[in-house]
Image (cartoon, rainbow, N blue to C red):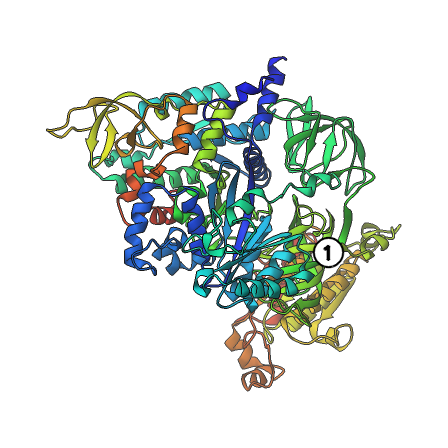
Amino acid sequence: MDTASMQGLGAPAAKDQLRFLTCGSVDDGKSTLIGRLLHDSKMIYEDQLQALARDSVKHGTTGNDIDFALLVDGLEAEREQGITIDVAYRFFATPRRSFMVADTPGHEQYTRNMATGASNAQVAIILIDARKGVLVQTKRHSFICSLLGIRHVVVAVNKIDLVDYRKEVFDRIVGDYVAFASALGFTSIVPIPISARYGDNITERSGNTEWYQGPCLLDHLESIDIRSETVGLPFRFPVQWVNRPNLDFRGYAGTVASGRIAVGDDIVVAASGRNSRVKRIVTYDGDQLSAEAGDAVTIALADEIDVGRGDVLAKAAERPEVADQFAAHIIWMDQEPMVPGRSYAFRIGTQSIASGSITAIKHKIDVNTREHLAATTLALNEIGFCNVATALPASFDSYEVNRRTGSFIIIDRYTNRTVGAGMIAFALRRATNIAWQPLSIGKQERSALKHQKPCIIWFTGLSGAGKSTIANMVDQKLFAGSHHTMLLDGDNLRHGLNRDLGFTEADRVENVRRVGEVAKLMVDAGLIVICSFISPYRAEREMVRSLVGEGEFIEVFVDTPIDECARRDPKGLYLKAKAGKIKNFTGVDAPYEAPSAPEVHLQTLDRRPDELADEVLNALHERGIGASG
Amino acid sequence: MNAHEMTRANAHMLPQHLRRLEAESIEIMRDVAAEFKRPVMLYSIGKDSSVMLHLAVKAFYPAKLPFPLMHIDTTWKFREMIAFRDETAKRLGVDLIVHINKAGLERGINPIDSGSSLHTQVMKTDALKQALDLYGFDAAFGGARRDEEKSRANERVFSFRSPGHVWDPRNQRPELWNLFNTRIRQGETMRVFALSNWTELDVWEYIMLEKIPVVPLYFAKERPVVHRNGTLIMVDDARLPLEPNETPEMRMVRFRTLGCYPLSGAIESEAATIEEIVTEMQVAKISERQGRLIDSDEAASMEKKKREGYF
């Protein structure tokens, strides 16, 4: 190729992109620094500069000087809406590199946003106010950067002008920083004395700090070696989309997460263990002989094997972990706290796992001191080290080794909000060591012998709604019709199997989980299982539903207004709850989430229990359950 | 070297930062195709749309686009834009839906008498919501970029809309790594900005290196214009009423952004090729949005439009 033709008029230099994060506390001058970088790299146009000069006089904090912070601080309306708590992304470029800056506010409660910004950053600039030195916030920001896998840190000692450009101040701060950061696993820590407001050591070395021999900030950002190490890692290809335009072509579209692959290489589908060989690596610009980390390509295999979205292609000798249990750091991002045992949806790479749960919080981490604390739940912005179990095995690597294949997000199954983010530490071997023992007699055979269709009839409702009374009658009527049934009652189980559980949200979730598993075993045994539990949370009832087959979970909502339940108060519990003698009482000081679409909805006011029981039986008949066999 | 190998060589000429942006956008598009029932690509005919469409063709090659393009036609676009749109759809063999807010037309809404604000609201924002409902689209790609406007810097790649296309800044999902949360319920939709991390210069450099066709209006040419409120407005057809003291004059102009012709200000320029545009961009002193009259018609106007569903 004629190299001269590549140097045409206006041709861009062969530059790369650096994504970095700025972390600082409220008055460390973060916005001023970003504004300064944008301005000094000529990313601010004249019309914007004119507007800035006007705004500086009106809103600025710098007298008649230009207030660079106003270039990046949000609009008034935004601040009112409270969205400045978000991550903002800014862009600037020099002839050597283009830059994307993730700008996150420094306030304590914004761990969530910092983690978001850090997740895609290669470098972090930690701002320290020269007058204040290393603060608790500095440590917090550094820890989060380290946890999220950032390996290069710039310590920008800002407002150096306000300490008369003194070397001792800078040296002391750098000493303090390095002392605590040595445990954080950073590959490089580069301290630079700067003044964002006056531009010292930003785009050129400042005459005010002649004692400083290092690079200016922009020089360092332009030259820091961030060549991705992902190319050297084992090959991982999370399949995004199956490309099947016609019968002659089937390709798997995705982006190479790490490593390299070449035509002719043997591959394995991580989860299924099936083998094949790479036949073609297809792109719009023509077939390639090989592809490496970061390339968006379409891979065609030599054999017709079952591959779909969520599968990870790897080389046979270097497979990712495949497990349904793993340990991970989790950052909680939702107002509603994490509940261990509750069923959440997960996304790991391109794998969507509809159901999984946090089975244990080993400890939570104080982000300021890195101390490990005991915890039963994680609140917004808390970080915990947890065990996670997923309904299906997932393919992954340790986050420390591979950011792309070791990360996941947690999604609330009902609100669909992203409630958590996780970084996998290691697989828990139990998953692979406990194999399913195949049973030679199955659910079908067992229920056929009983001439019935097994199912779970799940009564939910407030305490005193009439669940147990109606459930009992349904049980008796089914029994009278020669059906094999079993009744599981909340109070009864709390005397035995669940005697170690209380009434906190977490314990209630665990209570229902155990009942669900027991009921499922009974369904497998061919029984009609009648369950009577307050079961206040939608998520857990849906979790039980997901344990059994389609149509095998019949939710019966015993709908009695709370005033009526309190009037009946068969166990005297409402009286006690109102007197404050019982805590976490559903409907009084703990929530009840009514079913949105129950199979049977019983409105009990002015109705007799036997009528209501018949209504349930009718609903069962319609589903082919409970017809006499 | 055959023609096929030539294109490959070209692809590898892309500088690292553009290859990365390209791969990132392709990944986003494939996620949408895999996760949503009925996606659509909003096509505004401008340079960003041209890049977005080119990336989509790459993302799904050798298959055809697994979603249609949709243009919200205000009926006031430059004639050259409409010609380019139809040509492009034909050249690439893609499904193109053109939607016009008929009710708005009947009410006589236009950018001249109704004002830019009302015209944009009715013929663009309302029309878009209408069309999304009409076809039942659950995800819509848009070409907006984070560098366009200060208020867009914190916009998500996957922008969640409640039923009725409501954008609630408090109800947006954190986006970590490349793990987007694509789950929505019935009636909820997603706007997906696959070019979020591109800058205006990236877009032009990519157009140049990938030889992507764009509307000729971006290139300098002698065009009939009038001076109005400090901007140059092109007299694209007879619908533009001229003030008594206005006479169209031929000027060497081009456009940095394209929209409805009475609302798009031209800039004086000699840049007649993409290379010249990129060179001009590298020394540009004025932001691209300055030519857009709709930004300045109300204080904090983009912010407001964002909430109303303009993007």
Q: Chain of mark 1?
A: A
| Amino acid at dot 1 | Ala
| Residue appearing at x 77%, y 61% in the figure | A483
- Left or right, A457 with reference to B241: right
Element at label 1: strand
| Residue appearing at x 52%, y 53% in the figure | B173
| Residue appearing at x 49%, y 44% in the figure | B190
Q: Position of residue B291 (x, y in %)?
A: 30, 36
- Furthest toward the top, the residue is B2
Residue corresponding to mark 1: A425
Q: Is residue B215 visible?
A: yes
Q: Position of residue B151 (x, y in %)?
A: 39, 49
**Residue A52, above or below B36:** below
- Left or right, A603 with reference to B122: right
**Residue A44, above or below A290:** below
Classify the position of the N terminus of chain A by image quarter. top right
Q: How many marks?
A: 1
Between A63 and A619, the residue placed more toward the observer is A63
Between A93 and A145, the residue placed more toward the observer is A93
Q: Position of residue B221 (x, y in %)?
A: 31, 20
Q: Position of residue B231 (x, y in %)?
A: 24, 34
Q: Is residue A555 visible?
A: no
- Furthest toward the right, the residue is A440
Classify the position of the C terminus of chain A by image quarter. bottom right
- The quadrant holding residue B267 is top left
| Residue appearing at x 64%, y 31% in the figure | A297
Label 1 crowd (10 A; few <14 / some 14-19 / many >=20): many
- Left or right, A161 with reference to B241: right
